Structure formats: structure tokens, C-alpha cells
Amino acid sequence: MSNRTLAILKPDCVRKNFQGKVLSKIQEAGFKVLAMKQIRLTKSQAEGFYAVHKGRPFFAELTAFMSSGPCVPIALERNDAVATFRKTIGATDPAEAEPGTVRREFADSKGENIVHGSDSDENAKIEIGFFFSDSELLG
Ligand code: CMP
């Protein structure tokens, strides 16, 4: 069990100007920010980040959306980070997310669901490394 995970405030979150509201909920859940930046992914960077989903029917839609505007990757620290963060944001589909979760409160759809969270310790390490160098992670 690792203590780090990667969040991305997705382009819908930035467009709605909900970055502060979502970050508050993340901090209230006990996460510490190790690194954070705003970046606009190119289509090919989005395809690289989501390479595990290549071949899925929603891959084109997902990568077009993720490169449609700026997003905010955030490296986070907490004990049991991956599982706790996924609980904080709720199910992929906001209609299925528990009341009080980030996606239930702020997301519109399964595709435009406000926030990404790593799904395993192994992927958290890869995903944090996609956006940040070790020297940028300040604990
Ligand atoms: P995320 O946690 O960023 O990881 C993969 C993403 O694929 C997921 O959130 C959703 O936004 C997206 N996704 C999953 N299923 C679908 C779907 N059926 N249609 C569109 N996007 C989807």
C-alpha cells in the first residue's frame, strides 16, 4: 500500500472554475499536495497518458476531451492514497457515485467526470512520473 496518488482536475473542472471547490474536498479528505500545475495536453499526450484504455470504445472521446482545454494534475500524499482518493471522488459515473463525493456533487457524465484518480499503486507511480519529476514532489 503506497501513500501517493495522481489526481487530474479535468478540462470540465477548469472550464466550470471548480478547481478550488474540488481541491477543498480533496484537502478535507486529508490529502497533502506534493506538486500541482496547469497544463494543456496535446491529443497525443492524452493518448499516451490513457494508453491502458487504447481499444476501448470511449478512447477517442476520452482523449479528445482530455486535450480540449487546460487540466490540473496534482500529486497527492496520504496513507492508503489510491483507495481513499477513489472513495473521495466516487464512481466513474456521477449518477452512481455516493452522495458527498466529488463526482456526485460536481460532475455531469461518465465522460466529463471532473476528476481522474489513479486506480492502483503501480499506475499512481507511472502517472505521477508522467507529469512530475522527483525533484518537483515536495513533501
Ligand atoms: P478516469 O478515472 O479519468 O479514467 C478513464 C476514464 O475513461 C474515466 O475516468 C472516464 O472519464 C472515461 N470513461 C470510462 N467509461 C466511459 C464511457 N463509457 N464513456 C466515456 N468515457 C468513459
Image (cartoon, rainbow, N blue to C red):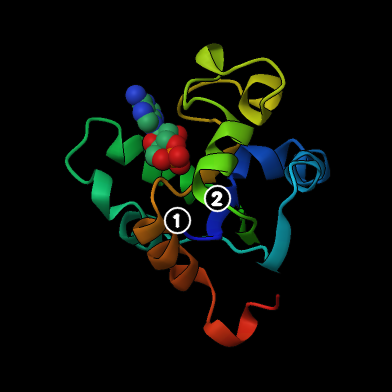
- Return the residue nearer the eye: 38 or 32: 32
Query: Residue 120, image x and y in percent?
Result: 38, 50
Q: How many numbered dots are placed on residues in this image?
A: 2
Mark 2 beta carbon near ligand 1 (under 8 Å): no
Quadrant of ligand 1: it is top left
Query: Residue 128, image x and y in percent?
Result: 49, 66
Dividing the picture into quarters, in which one does residue 22 lie? top right
- Please say if 111 is above or below 31: above
- Please say if 101 is above or below 130: above
First in sequence: mark 2 or mark 1? 1
Are dots 2 and 1 in contact, CB under 8 Å? yes
SS at mark 2 in the image: loop
Q: Which mark is residue 1?
A: 1
Give the farthest residue toward the left. Answer: 55
**For mark 2, what is the residue?**
80
Q: Which mark is residue 93?
A: none
Q: Residues within 10 Å of mark 2 (few under 14, many from 20)?
A: some
The kind of residue tagged 1 is: Met
- For the question of whether residue 36 can be seen, the reply is no
- Please say if 135 is above or below 137: below
In the rendered view of the protein, which quadrant contains the C terminus? bottom right
Query: Residue 58, image x and y in percent?
Result: 30, 32
- For the question of whether residue 59 can be seen, the reply is yes
- Return the residue nearer the eye: 52 or 61: 52
Q: Residue at x 63, y 34 (%)?
A: 88
Image-based side of 29 in relation to 137, left or right = right
Q: Residue at x 25, y 50 (%)?
A: 52
- Return the residue nearer the eye: 3 or 73: 3
How far apart in space, not on screen, are marks 2 and 1 (Cα)? 6 Å
Query: Residue 122, image x and y in percent?
Result: 35, 60
Q: Residue at x 54, y 75 (%)?
A: 132
SS at mark 1 in the image: loop
